[in-house]
Amino acid sequence: MIDRRFFLKSSGLALVGGTLLPNVFVKMANAATTKGNKTLVAIFQRGAVDGLNMIVPYGEQAYYAARPTIAVPRPGVEGGAIDLDGFFGLHPSLASLSPYFKDHSLAMIHAVGSPDTTRSHFDAQDFMESGTPGVKSTEDGFLSRAVGLKKQTPVSPLRAVALSPAMPRILAGSAGAVAMTNISQFGIRGNANVSGGFESMYAEAVAGTLGGTAKESFEAARILKSADPQKLQPNNGAVYPNGPLGNSLRQIAQLIKSNVGLEVAFADVSGWDTHAGEGGAQGQLANNLRNFSDAIAAFARDLGSRMGDVVLVTMSEFGRTVHENGNRGTDHGHANVMMLLGGGVKGGKVHGKWPGLGSQQLYENRDLAITTDFRDIFAELLTKQLAVPSLKTVFPGYEPKLRGVLSS
Amino acid sequence: MKPATKLLAGLIAVTMLTGATSDNKLTDRERALHVLNRLAFGPRPGDVDAVMKDGVNTWIEQQLHPEGIPDRAVEARIAALPTMTMSNAQIVKTYYEPVLMARKKANADAKDGEVDKKEARREYMRDVPFDKRPQNVMNDLLTERIVRAAESDRQLNEVLVDFWMNHFNVFAGKGIDRFLLTSYERDVIRPHIWGRFEDLLMATAKSPAMLFYLDNARSVAAPENRPMVAQRFGRRAMEMNPQRKKQQGGLNENYAREIMELHTLGVDGGYTQKDVTELARVLTGWTITGERDGGQGAAFIFRPMLHDSGSKTVLGIRFPAGGGIAEGEKMIHVLAHHPATAHHIALQLCQRLVADDPPPALVDRVAAKFLATDGDLRETVRAVISSPEFWDPKSYRAKVKSPFEYAISAVRAVNAQITDATPIARSLQQIGEPLYGAQPPTGYSDKADVWINTGALMNRLNFALALASNKLPGVHGDVVALIPAKEAADASRSVEALAQALTGGNLTEETRATIKSRIVERKAPTEDPWDNTQLPTVAGLILGSPEFQRQ
């Protein structure tokens, strides 16, 4: 098998003659060739990914002491982390993302998370998606509120799309997002009378309620039918790995390239709840991370210069225990890591204040402490990438601090 | 109000025009429809009249005692599915061992690096006779669940099986759980849903399926806390040999957390992280038998040697050092009788049977009944059903059907015969909630999430069209036969008659007018005379209508 990193680099060379591929979209971002059509792509790693094995603090002896069987080795040895900055390293399964970090288009924020203390998957996801940690009564998702505040003319029924069978909490609300798993099958399998019949039934049935018609669905289905984005093949030799995330990102890229007005895309990917047999450089988490990384790398390659208009962000409800448990896995923890990739990202850097893994430094004596609120990162994304005019109602009661993860 | 609730309110407002009456009571017909929607998977043709004839209360009382309902045809059909009568051990032996053998042989072949391991494994699996292949297990189980829901006369029983399987969710996609779910549903859930909650909880806690799914089977005492080690070498000796320690495993808090958060107390039930860790210690040694244990294997076992022998405190209850399985049994007893558990179970039952956001007073009363009856689940369910809130017109058609409820109610509405359940199982996947397919321990939400503007809705509509037009192979219905020939012969009247037959009269004037203008009036009189061939399309539109999404 060809070494993946070598393959990426060499084909990048072939593609743009002497420059590494990622340079392209950074350059394009600077050139600002856009039609104002910026897109934010959010990926939720449901189940709480082990951020400490994703972006490895190999400079901490405490990391190795806490994880005798599942630590990722230091750079330079077999199966070792890929060095980022002399302290943090990428899990070797994330190798396909490494060129983007080197090219300053990929950034991480470590020790980031939701300040609520819960270690419940459900509550933590709910708090993160509502954008109101600790408040269960919030009606809608914060991305929906953000999209609702942003003007778009004309309004596209595909401005906010979730690649998911049901509407995820984060996009629930009045902004009129649509959720689908397969853009080529989104629509009614029947003649115009049948689909028209359903359309008027649903328009009438829920008329007058806040965001409450299926109008967007039927309009979206029509646009998808005429724009036919699924005919678009991946560009630049991008190959998406099999699996749900690859499928989702391939279709998000098709929507972006079809210019259907996509502003916010959301995809989720599960399988991160590694209570047992997590593995280190190899194993369960390594396999999941490889698929995750390759899907994102394929997306960036596919979009090429268009990636200058796109920022992709990854998130997960909480981190996992610093110490491995009795089954070579990890239990529910606190702070985690986020990644940002795309145009305008201040990349090549692991952002965030590192709280340390010493026993005095841990949250509740067991978990990575939070030094950056996840809302700070989204505040910057929403302001700079999507030009959302105000965040007051997006994150009610919270004053976000911009952390400088994007150039303005 | 949540956005979802607002959507619902809009629908309810329209429904009120033709649905519930304006005074504050449901009519007899509405009452019959209500119980058939909430305590059954929707009416089959004629069911509403039959329930009205015997009386709604009589029907409810029968449903509360499913053991008195014969249901022979369905039982006979289920018994004919080969895996339905097999034990965990038999299933593992018959269907999992060929997989292991294939894996082993493929690994051996691939050792020299010239053979592709996956391809070799596929090759070996092709040699396994069809009736010994692993997918038979899940196919049988899907068939069983779908056929029972659609055809069993013990409808409330099936509704509650669905509720409890979801409450104590086990994901078929995790490891060997796909081979353990048959027994889990048959031996753990079904026999206990009309008894005491504690017995149900204890049965799940000792079930191989749950022990594997939430990793308790692997959770063992830290080596220095094991009885033999402590006696023989002293605790210090273990600590001095970390290499040995890490090979021997230790605590896993996955199940300890979820039994409190999801199965009993609820997330706000007042436990701490310390309680989670201590309960995990209490439950160490609760695991699954293997070959070495003699017997058939794949059964519950308590291993004293792997149990944490130290002292522990959970929820303020102190266990002195040296305890055994009794510690865990005591904690399950405590959790099952905790007021927070009563409230959590009451809330979830009310969400399932009454409304997404049930009145707090109702939840409190149901919780009180739970506590007063020692967690008697029949009496707890009865408390929900007999409450004024259940019968309040505000509850009538106030819930959106779950994907399973929707698909099964459509199958029942057209009185379809299921010879192959696979297309229904596949549709449930497309509508977003595959059976046995919820990965997180939370299961699926019993509250209607925002269901509009989703591919899931589109897939519901496509399912309705396919079902009504007999395009689901193995699921056969005849919508023309549902209405009298005289009605079917008239275009406009056939819409009215089908609406009555499929929804029990719950289709709004607007929806009926839409169907007539879109389908009927385009067919006649300008084109050929009305000839029934449009009836399946009409039925598909009715089954896809907003009204039919509700219960």
Image (cartoon, rainbow, N blue to C red):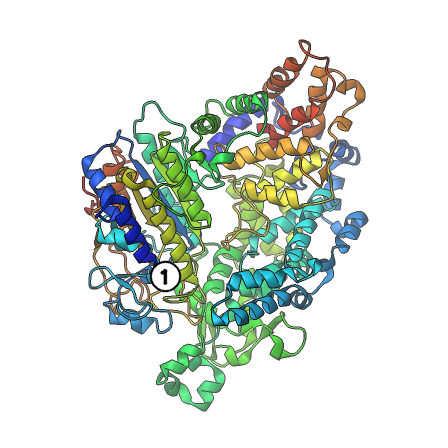
Q: Is residue B345 left or right of residue B32?
A: left
Q: Nearer the viewer, residue B192 or B510?
A: B510
Locate the N terminus of chain A and report the quarter of the image it occupies. Answer: bottom left
All told, the count of numbered labels is 1
Determine the residue located farthest toward the bottom in the rendered image.
Answer: B232
User: Where in the figure is residue A319, as x and y percent of width and height?
Assistant: 35, 58
| Residue A139 visible in the displayed image | no
Badge 1 density bin: few <14, some 14–19, many ≥20, Cα 10 Å: many
Residue under the image location 44 percent in, 63 percent down: A284
Figure check: B174 above or below B422: below
Quarter that holds the C terminus of chain A: top left
Of residue B308 and residue B412, the one placed in the foreground of this image is B412
Q: Amino acid at mark 1?
A: Arg
Chain on which label 1 sits = A
Q: Position of residue B57 (x, y in %)?
A: 73, 39
Q: Residue furthest top?
A: B526
Residue B237 as seen in the image, left or right of residue B505: left
Q: Nearer the viewer, residue B29 or B163?
A: B163
| Residue A165 relative to residue A260: left or right | right
Q: Quadrant of residue A31?
A: top left
Depth check: give the residue in front, A109 or B220.
A109
Q: Compared to B28, does B319 lie above or below?
A: below
Residue that mark 1 sits on: A320
Residue B441 position within the rendered picture, expressed as x and y whole percent measured from the top left: 51, 55
**Residue B340 in view:** yes
Q: Position of residue A126 (x, y in %)?
A: 40, 47
| Image height of B142 relative to A31, above or below | below
Q: Would you identify the image quadrant in which residue A312 lies? A: top left
Question: Which residue lies at the image location 57% right of the left edge and 40% below the top edge?
Answer: B402
Local secondary structure at mark 1: loop
